Image (tube, rainbow, N blue to C red):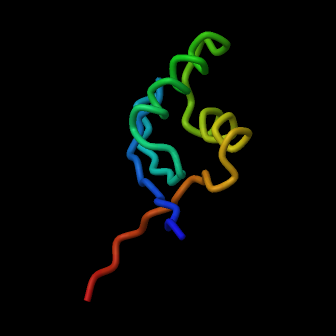
Amino acid sequence: MTEKKIYYYRIYDDNEQKSYFKCSYNKIEIRKLLKEFEQTHEKYFNNDFVKYLQEKDTEAELIELHNLYY
């Protein structure tokens, strides 16, 4: 049985907002999906892209990061 890999990505949108997301697609597949997404979207926003990605990959989701100091 092969274990499904999960990949983590950092992305920046047209507002220069940084976000993180995880999904089961590798970098090559994500680049193809980004090209498809750009054909139907004039502006690029992280939330919109992740929603688009979720239609194709149920593992996809935004990740919220927080600093933890100790």
Question: As rendered, which of 22 and 42 lies closer to the eye?
Answer: 22
At 48% from the left and 33% from the top, the residue drawn is 29
Compared with 49, 22 (above or below) is below
Name the residue rendered at 34%, 71% in the picture.
67
Can you say whether 54 is above or below 62 in the image?
Answer: above
Nearer to the camera, 25 or 50: 25
Number of marks in picture: 0
Percent of width and height locating residue 35: 52, 17
User: Residue 1: percent from the left, percent from the top?
Assistant: 54, 70
Q: Residue furthest right?
A: 55
Residue at the extreme bottom of the image, as rendered: 70
Relative to 52, is 35 on the left or the right? left
Q: Which residue is pictured at 25% across the width and 89% down the height?
A: 70
**Front in this rendered view, residue 56 or 67:** 56
Quarter occupied by residue 42: top right
Q: Which residue lies furthest to the left in this view?
A: 70
Q: Residue at x 56, y 30 (%)?
A: 45
Question: Left or right of 63: which side holds 65?
Answer: left
In this rendering, position of residue 45 left or right of residue 12: right
Q: Residue 7: percent from the left, percent from the top?
A: 43, 54
